[in-house]
Image (cartoon, rainbow, N blue to C red):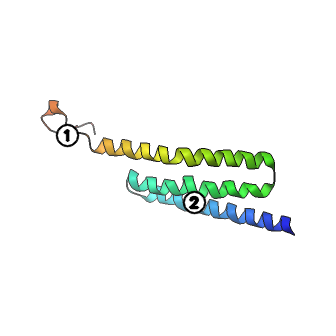
């Protein structure tokens, strides 16, 4: 009986995680600029992925659970850092100082 409840909870977490990933990926395609796309990507990389990894606890396998914990730790550390790096690069690309060689004219290659 308890095994069936654990499997049901794992299935529900997996379904919820995949639903959030689908919504986030759809939003990623619909958003107009990189800053709004980063918001949608955060939904996929944080909430959806962590729910899918949490669903792996229902397998009961020590190897799978250990791998899921390690991947979750890696994602929790690297996702905010990579999102910040992408946002900062996009902001710097759009806010470059005018080139002095062109007398303040914007760069035509942009």
Contact between marks 1 and 2 (CB within 8 A): the answer is no
For the C terminus, the image quarter is: top left
Rendering coords of residue 49 (x, y %): 61, 54
Relative to 39, is 95 above or below? above
In the image, what residue occupies the spot 55% across and 52% down? 45
Q: Residue furthest top?
A: 101
In the image, what residue occupies the spot 75% across and 56% down? 57
Rendering coords of residue 3 (x, y %): 85, 64
In the image, what residue occupies the spot 68% across and 63% down? 13
Residue toward you, 68 or 43: 68
Q: Residue furthest left?
A: 103
For the N terminus, the image quarter is: bottom right
Judged from the image, the secondary structure of the residue bearing numbered disc 2 is: helix
Judged from the image, the secondary structure of the residue bearing numbered disc 1 is: loop
Mark with earlier residue (1, 2): 2
Rendering coords of residue 50 (x, y %): 62, 55
Residue picked out by circle 2: 22
In the picture, the disc for residue 54 is: none
Image side of residue 89 versus residue 74, left or right: left
- Residue 84 visible in the current orientation: yes
In the image, what residue occupies the spot 22% across and 39% down? 97
| Mark 1 crowd level (few <14, some 14–19, many ≥20, 10 Å Cα) | few
Residue toward you, 8 or 110: 8
- Residue 25 visible in the current orientation: no
- Measured in 3D between alpha carbons, the distance from the residue under mark 1 to the one under mark 2, in whole angstroms, is 39 Å
Image side of residue 48 versus residue 38, left or right: right
Image side of residue 19 versus residue 8, left or right: left
Residue picked out by circle 1: 106
């Amino acid at each position: 009986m308890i095994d069936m409840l654990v499997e049901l909870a794992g299935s529900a977490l997996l379904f919820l995680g995949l639903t959030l990933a689908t919504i986030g990926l759809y939003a990623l395609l619909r958003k107009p600029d990189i800053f709004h796309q980063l918001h949608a990507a955060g939904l996929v990389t944080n909430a959806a992925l962590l729910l899918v990894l949490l669903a792996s606890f229902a397998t009961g396998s020590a190897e799978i659970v250990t791998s899921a914990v390690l991947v979750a730790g890696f994602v929790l550390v690297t996702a905010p850092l990579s999102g910040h790096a992408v946002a900062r690069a996009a902001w710097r690309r759009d806010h470059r100082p005018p080139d002095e060689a062109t007398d303040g004219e914007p760069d035509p290659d942009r």
